[in-house]
Amino acid sequence: MTIFEKIIAKEIPAKLAYEDDEVIAIHDINPQAPVHVLVIPKRVIPRIGQAQATDAPLLGRLLLTASKIAADLGLADSGYRVVINHGRNGGETVPHLHVHVLGGRRMSWPPG
Ligand code: 5GP
């Protein structure tokens, strides 16, 4: 069980930003920006590269939820970044697909 499954099961506490039947969003424990939220599907997909065509509705829901949370947290005008890390070079550390929403500061490009 990954840390995110334990958070979804409420076995480990997290600061909730949003929850519905398919998705949970929590504030990152180690924020990289003033706002740093993780949007996580309750059904485990290990990483984006393992998503299947049948996962398309859930993937769409993750992105729409990321956009809604960004707006709810006041980031729509100032802007924000949406990130998915896949594998070692991508910086993935938790093998349960999640979308990072980062905002509240100016992001640099290219990313580090
Ligand atoms: P990844 O590196 O896999 O893209 O992102 C994993 C994220 O999960 C990291 O930003 C890390 O700080 C966050 N994280 C890891 N463990 C916990 C936890 O127990 N609670 C919360 N809220 N975030 C966590």
Image (cartoon, rainbow, N blue to C red):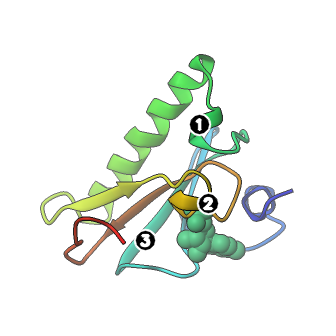
- Is 84 on the left-hand or right-hand side of 71? right
Kindly identify which numbered label has been placed on residue 49: 1
Residue 62 on image: x %, y %: 48, 41
At 60% from the left edge and 25% from the top edge, which residue is drawn? 55
At 23% from the left edge and 64% from the top edge, which residue is drawn? 75
> Which residue has dot 3 on it?
36
Disc 2 element: helix
- Rounded to the nearest whole Å, what is the CA distance between mark 3 and mark 1? 23 Å
User: Residue 15, can we see it?
Assistant: no
Q: Is residue 52 above or below residue 62?
A: above
What type is the residue that disc 2 sits on? Arg
The crowding category of the residue bearing disc 3, from other C-alpha atoms within 10 Å (few below 14, some 14 to 19, many at least 20), is many
Q: Is mark 3 within 8 Å of ligand 1?
A: yes
> Which residue has dot 2 on it?
88
Q: Is residue 71 above or below residue 109?
A: above
- Rounded to the nearest whole Å, what is the CA distance between mark 3 and mark 2? 21 Å
The crowding category of the residue bearing disc 1, from other C-alpha atoms within 10 Å (few below 14, some 14 to 19, many at least 20), is few
Q: Of all residues shown, which one is farthest toward the front?
A: 89
Residue 109 on image: x %, y %: 22, 66
Identify the image quadrant of the N terminus. bottom right
